[in-house]
Amino acid sequence: MKKRYFIYLSYNGTAYHGWQIQPNGISVQEVLEKSLSTVLRVKIEIVGAGRTDTGVHAQLMVAHFDFDGQIPENMAFTKKMNSILPKDIAIQKMIEVNAEAHARFDAISRRYEYHIVTSKNVFKNELATRLHDTMNFVAMNEAAKALFDYQDFTSFSKLHTDVKTNNCVITQACWTQSGDEWIFTIEADRFLRNMVRAIVGTLFEVGRGKMSVEEFRRVIEARNRCEAGSSVPAQGLYLTNIAYPESVFKV
């Protein structure tokens, strides 16, 4: 009888064409499936909680897979997987879940962070976005609060996607400072393609004084991607958490 497992992992996305398997580039999903198939000695296919774009990182990604054999004790399995995975992908843990649990559809919230540095930092060239402008983070935080008042975020969505709705419920959105970094944290029940990078790019317009908070609201209300700011670079974006209801886990 097949059992279903959630696998928790992290990765540096610099070398990958995103999470999802691509015809013309290496992806995190492809590497993970090959490693799982090697360890478990049977072809394994995995389903991720979402997909991150080329160059985007994950401090926490969750995926599920099915297997009808005997999996080694969790620590041994994790150690074995990490020994064959490349240095930029790491397994944190693997747990058995209910047979119908789904890594993508059962997720109740996701959290992202966008990292910027305001001075030259040789250790974060691929892990944060360097900003040369002086930003008004007070105004950016005031504008971010407006996100709580809306649900339709068409203005921040990549065009021509196959989703049925552009509605999302945002529960957290703020900028905080940590050393030479500023971090934008945003949490919602779901995200649209390119949504976080488009929101951050538009908040940059507020921070530079080129857009008021009221104009930021009008961008959202326009439901038009052309009204929003440019998408920011991928290297500053991290998927940091995915939450599930207790009902998906084995008692």
Image: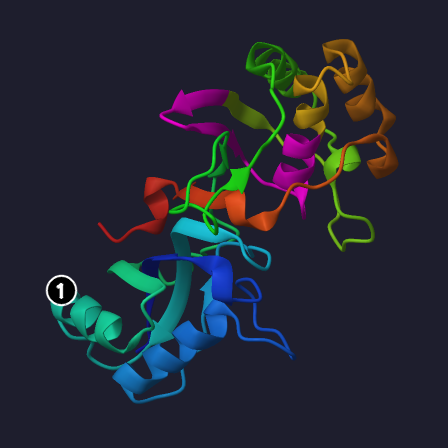
The residue pinned by badge 1 equals: 75
Front residue of 111 and 99 = 111
Residue pictured at 17% horizontal, 69% vertical: 79
Residue pictured at 48% horizontal, 42% vertical: 128
Magenta span contains residue 132: no
Front residue of 27 and 63 = 27
- Using residue 89 as the reference point, say whether residue 115 is left or right of it: right
Front residue of 62 and 214 = 214
- In magenta, the rendered stretch is 175-201
Amino acid at dot 1: Met
- Using residue 36 as the reference point, say whether residue 126 is left or right of it: right
- Using residue 96 as the reference point, say whether residue 32 is left or right of it: right
Please identify the quadrant where the N terminus is shown: bottom left
Image location (x, y in percent) of residue 246: 32, 41
* Location of residue 230 (image quadrant): top right
> Is 196 located above or below residue 78 in the figure?
above
